[in-house]
Image: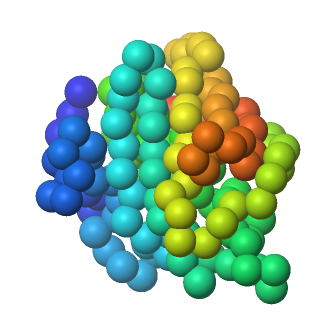
């Protein structure tokens, strides 16, 4: 696989041993709104974490559905990169299906557990759960189209 693109972090996380730091270096793009992201692959599953803050909340002081969807979308790409299937930033989401199961709590780690169902020449089919502690918050499936080789 090629070296990571210079606009992305994908390196050992300085504060969390055994985790990679994932995200954009440029702070004026959407992904940075989600905050510090951590990734780790174990037993064929990619675990992607974020810590929701007040800026991610709705009026009920839970994680806003839009913030959750953004996190899930970014988690698909973090997983695809962590599995060594794509280089970050050049693929696109074709679809994302989500069912909200419970409310996400602000100030407690959210963890997306992503698995690859199938890879074809151009597509990645993935699914997963978003957990907070031992409680499911959302389940999802999505398809990513890999970049065209130049």
Residue 13 appears at what percent x and percent y?
Answer: 21, 53
Seen at 81% across and 80% down, the residue is 60
Considering the image in quadrants, where does the N terminus appear? top left
Q: Is residue 28 above or below residue 141?
A: below
Q: Is residue 12 above or below residue 24?
A: above
Of residues 130 and 93, the one drawn nearer to the viewer in this rendering:
130
Seen at 60% across and 14% down, the residue is 118
Quarter of the rendering containing residue 138:
top right
Q: Is residue 105 visible?
A: yes
Considering the image in quadrants, where does the C terminus appear? top left
Left or right of 38: which side holds 19?
Answer: left
Q: How is the image coloured?
A: rainbow
Residue 87 appears at what percent x and percent y?
Answer: 35, 39
Seen at 39% across and 58% down, the residue is 37
Seen at 69% across and 61% down, the residue is 104
**Number of numbered tags placed on the structure image:** 0
Quarter of the rendering containing residue 126:
top right
Of residues 34 and 90, the one drawn nearer to the viewer in this rendering:
34
Residue 16 appears at what percent x and percent y?
Answer: 23, 52
Left or right of 76: which side holds 27?
Answer: left
């Amino acid at each position: 696989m090629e070296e990571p693109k210079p606009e992305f972090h994908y390196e050992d996380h300085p504060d969390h041993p055994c985790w990679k730091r994932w995200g954009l270096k440029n702070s004026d793009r959407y992904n940075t709104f989600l905050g510090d992201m951590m990734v780790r692959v174990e037993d064929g599953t990619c675990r992607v974490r974020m810590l929701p803050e007040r800026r991610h909340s709705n009026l009920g002081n839970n994680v806003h559905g839009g913030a959750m969807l953004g996190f899930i979308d970014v988690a698909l790409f973090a997983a695809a990169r962590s599995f060594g299937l794509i280089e970050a930033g050049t693929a696109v989401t074709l679809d994302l299906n989500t069912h909200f199961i419970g409310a996400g709590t602000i100030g407690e780690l959210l963890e997306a557990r992503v698995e690859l169902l199938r890879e074809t020449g151009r597509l990645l089919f993935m699914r997963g759960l978003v957990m907070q502690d031992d409680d499911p918050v959302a389940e999802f499936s999505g398809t990513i189209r890999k970049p065209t080789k130049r």
